[in-house]
Amino acid sequence: MPSLPGVAAMNHTYRLVWNEENQRYVPAPECARTRGKRSGGVLWSVVHALAAAFAPPRVAQAPAENALPSGGQVVAGQAGIRQSGNRMTVDQASSRAVIDWQGFDIGSQAAVHFNQPSADAVALNRVLAGDASRIHGQLTANGQVWLVNPKGVIFGAGSRVSVGGLVASTMDITNADFMAGKAVFDRDGAIGGIENHGQITAADGGLVALLAPAVKNDGIVSARLGKVVLAAGERIALDIDADGLLSVAVDPAAVKTLIENRQLIVADGGEVVMTGRAANLLSASVVTKHGTVQARTMAGREGRILLLADMEHGRTEVSGTLDASAPDGGNGGFIETSAAKVSFDDAVLITTKAGKNGKNGRWLIDPSDFTIAESGGDITGALLSSQLGEGDVEIQSSLGGAGGGGDIHVNDAVSWSENTLTLTAARDINMGSSQKTENKAR
């Protein structure tokens, strides 16, 4: 894994808007729309049902306010554990260390710090007993902290995680793979989920990975110039090559999967990947709902946002904001929304708009079938027209997913005055008799 230097600072370019469903204020970009009708009502009803069915197990109550991890035993590498009151310090001497715990809770008034030999150092913490880990206090490290608990990991409201990098997983990794520098996680029957209601911050260039059959972000995740991964599957392999490019390989899970963002994920100058795969029909879903995923161009590095559900029977449902723009200058980034079925709320904002003297980026929609319609479709012509003001758009249908035939249906008028709309169908592009696409660019 790459070096993870420094500590990221949040770029506060948000305002609070009222969310009717949650009955509270939530962060949104200054340019975000606040209201709008929904398209694909049936699909959104399905999403509500999926969210309820796949929600990670909830813990009845928070841990005691001074709770700390218990029963720690170092089983690989070198590390020492010391405690003073409601503070625990793990002094790691080797570049990699594995610690088995009987429990790993952090109360709201407690703190755990990993004192590591370098930003490249990694500590794997595996929970062997008890319930889901409940992190309500502070977790800090100058290197990377990996926490594995098959029962689940919940970062409570008010929790603060500030580390070089973080992997929280209900999927296990072998000591041999970990010590050899491999990041390969197997579900091995685990059904626990990951929830974040707090604030997770990785160092500049750092990695935050939340891996479980169900992952829900209802807080803030930040990894400036780094990578954020929310992934669900039977087996997940993470790899970052010498050029800093992230590869996420996911094998389909034998259980239902759901990846959901309701609040804020920021990886300016980096990459956000939300991906889930499942082996059964209608059991894989990637959802961003009333939340913001931001990977803006920063320091000359274009951001990437990938929302990828299973191409056989998965669903990607998008509302809120996907922002890979370049407001401070430079080229816009890249956004991909892919699955067997892809649909969009009418209040969504998806932008790859360039800054001054830059080139707009590209948004790729990759479903099995796709319908542009005023109602009952996957996106309205009005919404697609407005998004074409934010960058190039490519719709590319594929064969086979969810019984689809690889068609694109244009049943609503689409017009734009800049950028490019590209339609590429595996089979047919069907234009409604009264509809057209009109490029008004001169």
Image (cartoon, rainbow, N blue to C red):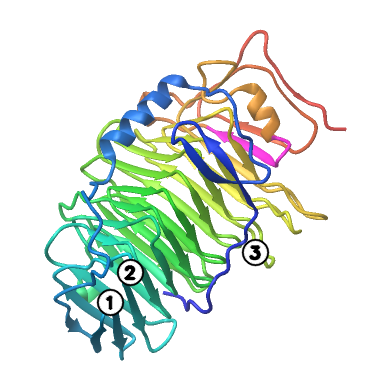
Residue at 82% from the left image edge and 27% from the top image edge: 440
Q: Is residue 55 above or below residue 40?
A: below
Image check: 379 left or right of 285? right
Few, some or many residues within 10 Å of mark 1 (<14, 14–19, 20+): some
User: Of residues 183 and 328, which is closer to you in this image?
Assistant: 328
Residue 301 is marked as 3
Identified by mark 1, the residue type is Asn
Residue 402 is marked as none
**Is the Cβ of the residue at disc 2 closer than 8 Å to that at disc 1?**
yes
Which residue has dot 1 on it?
Answer: 86
Identified by mark 3, the residue type is Arg
User: Of residues 306 and 367, which is closer to you in this image?
Assistant: 306
Identified by mark 2, the residue type is Gln
The residues bearing labels 1 and 3 have C-alpha atoms spaced at a distance of 41 Å
Nearer to us: label 1 or label 3: 1
Q: Secondary structure at mark 2?
A: loop
User: Of residues 383 and 338, which is closer to you in this image?
Assistant: 383
Few, some or many residues within 10 Å of mark 2 (<14, 14–19, 20+): some
Is 439 contained in the magenta span?
A: no
Residue at 29% from the left image edge and 52% from the top image edge: 212
Q: Secondary structure at mark 1?
A: loop
Q: Earlier in the sequence, mark 3 or mark 2?
A: 2
Magenta-drawn segment: 388-396
